[in-house]
C-alpha cells in the first residue's frame, strides 16, 4: 500500500512540471520558423496622374435681372382709367396700346381748341384785309398815317392770336394722345400697378422689360477680373437643371471698396425658365490650360482636407494632402501634392490609411 504524498511534495512536483513545459515551448520556438504574416485583404486599383488640357473656369453666383426695365406712366392727372389691355408676362410690340383713359373731357377740350383756332384764323384774315384796304386809302391820302398804323397793329395782334390758338389746339391734341399709353419699345410686361376705374395721379402704371432681354449679374473677385474678357461665354443652370448659355457683354470698371469685387454682366439671349430676380451659379470660361488631374474617386476628404494615396515601395501606400482645383467632369485638378506620372489609388481609397499594404488589381497603372 502506497502512502499519500504530503502537500509540500505535491507543490514541488507541479512547479517542476510547469518549468519543463516552458522549456519545451522555448525550444520549439527557437528550433522552428516563425509563421508568415497574414496577407493584406486591401485590394485597390491604380491610375497614373496625368496632364490634360482643360477649359479654365471661374465659378460665381449672381442674379438674373432685366437688361433695361422701363417704368411706364402717363403725362396726365385726375383722369379715370377706362381700360387696361395687358397683364404681367404679356409680350408687346412697339406702339401697342397698353392702357386707355377716359377721353370724354379731353375730346371736349380738343373741340374747344379747334373752335378757338377757327375764330382766331377768321380774325387774322379780317385784320389782313383791313390793313390792305387801309394801305390803299393811305396812298390816296384818305386816312392818316396814324390810322394806318392802328390797322397794321390789329393785323399783327390777330396773327399772334391765331398762332396761340394753333399752339393750344396742338396741346389739346397731345393731351388726347396721352389718353392711350403705348409701349415705347417691344418687350415683356413685368408689373402692373393700375386697375380700370382708378383715377391716375402720375406715377408708375406698368413696368416693361425692354425687348424681353435678361442678363446675369455676378460679383467677381478682383484677382479673377484680368482673366475675364467681353465676348466670353458663361454656363448657367435653370431652375429645372437645364443649361443656359450667356455671353459677357461688360465688366464693371470699378471695384466695390468693401468686398473688393466687381460686377460682370452677361446677356442671356435664350434665358429659358430663368426669370428676373432669380439667383443662378455660373461658370465663366476663361481659356485653356495644361494641368495635372486625378480621378474624382481618388480624392478623399479627412478633417476637411483633400488627400490621395500614392503607391510607394513594398506595396505600401503613402497618404498625401493635395491642393485641388475645381472638378473637371470625372477628374479633379491637382494644384500641388502630386506630380504627373505618379501612381495613385483610384478605387478603394476611402478605406485606406497611411502605410497600408495593398494588393493591386486592374487599373491603367502597372
Image (cartoon, helix red, strand yellow):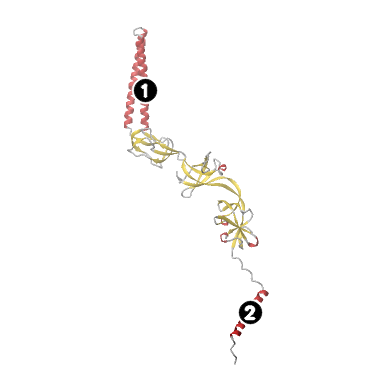
User: Which numbered dot is residue 164?
Assistant: 1
Number of marks drawn: 2
Residue at screen point 37% across, 20% down: 160
Work out whether 341 lies above or below 123: below
Q: Quadrant of residue 338?
A: bottom right
Residue 257 image point, x, y percent? 52, 41
What kind of element bears circle 1?
helix
Badge 2 crowding class, 10 Å Cα cut-off, few under 14, some 14 to 19, many 20 or more, is: few
Looking at this rendering, what residue extends furthest in the right direction? 31
Q: Nearer the viewer, residue 248 or 306?
A: 306
From what the image shows, is residue 210 above or below residue 291?
A: above
- Name the front one of labels 2 and 1: 2
Q: Residue 133, how many percent across, how many down?
A: 35, 12
Q: Are marks 2 and 1 in contact (CB under 8 Å)?
A: no
Q: Earlier in the sequence, mark 2 or mark 1?
A: 2
Residue drawn where x is 58% and y is 48% of the image: 54
Location of the C terminus (image quadrant) = bottom right
Residue labelled with disc 2: 19
Disc 2, SS: helix
Mark 2 and mark 1: Cα distance apart in space: 138 Å
Please state which of residues 315 and 3 is positioned toward the viewer in this rendering. 3
Amino acid at each position: 500500500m502506497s502512502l499519500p504524498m504530503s502537500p509540500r511534495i505535491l507543490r514541488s512536483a507541479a512547479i517542476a512540471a510547469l518549468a519543463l513545459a516552458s522549456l519545451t515551448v522555448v525550444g520549439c520556438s527557437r528550433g522552428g520558423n516563425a509563421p508568415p504574416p497574414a496577407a493584406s485583404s486591401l485590394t485597390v486599383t491604380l491610375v497614373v496622374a496625368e496632364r490634360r488640357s482643360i477649359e479654365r473656369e471661374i465659378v460665381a453666383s449672381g442674379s438674373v435681372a432685366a437688361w433695361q426695365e422701363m417704368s411706364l406712366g402717363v403725362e396726365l392727372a385726375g383722369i379715370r382709367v377706362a381700360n387696361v389691355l395687358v397683364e404681367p408676362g404679356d409680350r408687346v410690340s412697339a406702339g401697342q396700346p397698353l392702357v386707355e383713359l377716359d377721353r370724354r373731357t379731353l375730346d371736349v377740350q380738343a373741340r374747344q381748341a379747334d373752335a378757338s383756332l377757327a375764330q382766331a384764323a377768321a380774325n387774322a384774315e379780317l385784320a389782313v384785309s383791313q390793313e390792305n384796304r387801309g394801305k390803299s386809302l393811305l396812298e390816296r391820302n384818305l386816312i392818316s398815317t396814324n390810322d394806318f398804323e392802328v390797322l397794321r397793329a390789329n393785323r399783327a395782334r390777330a396773327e399772334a392770336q391765331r398762332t396761340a390758338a394753333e399752339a393750344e389746339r396742338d396741346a389739346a391734341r397731345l393731351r388726347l394722345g396721352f389718353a392711350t399709353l403705348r409701349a415705347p419699345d417691344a418687350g415683356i410686361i413685368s408689373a402692373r400697378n393700375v386697375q380700370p376705374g382708378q383715377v391716375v395721379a402720375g406715377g408708375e402704371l406698368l413696368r416693361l422689360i425692354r425687348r424681353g432681354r435678361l442678363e446675369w449679374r455676378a460679383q467677381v473677385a478682383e484677382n479673377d477680373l484680368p482673366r475675364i474678357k467681353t465676348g466670353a461665354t458663361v454656363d448657367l443652370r435653370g431652375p429645372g437643371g437645364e443649361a443656359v448659355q450667356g455671353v459677357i457683354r461688360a465688366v464693371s470698371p470699378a471695384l466695390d471698396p468693401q468686398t473688393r469685387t466687381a460686377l460682370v454682366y452677361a446677356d442671356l439671349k435664350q434665358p429659358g425658365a430663368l426669370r428676373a430676380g432669380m439667383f443662378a451659379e455660373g461658370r465663366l470660361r476663361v481659356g485653356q490650360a495644361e494641368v495635372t488631374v486625378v480621378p474624382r474617386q481618388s480624392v478623399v476628404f479627412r478633417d476637411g482636407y483633400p488627400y490621395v494615396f500614392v503607391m510607394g515601395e513594398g506595396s505600401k501606400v503613402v497618404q498625401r494632402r493635395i491642393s485641388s482645383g475645381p472638378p473637371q467632369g470625372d477628374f479633379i485638378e491637382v494644384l500641388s501634392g502630386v506630380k504627373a506620372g505618379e501612381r495613385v489609388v483610384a478605387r478603394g481609397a476611402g478605406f485606406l490609411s497611411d502605410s497600408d499594404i495593398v494588393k493591386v488589381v486592374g487599373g491603367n497603372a502597372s
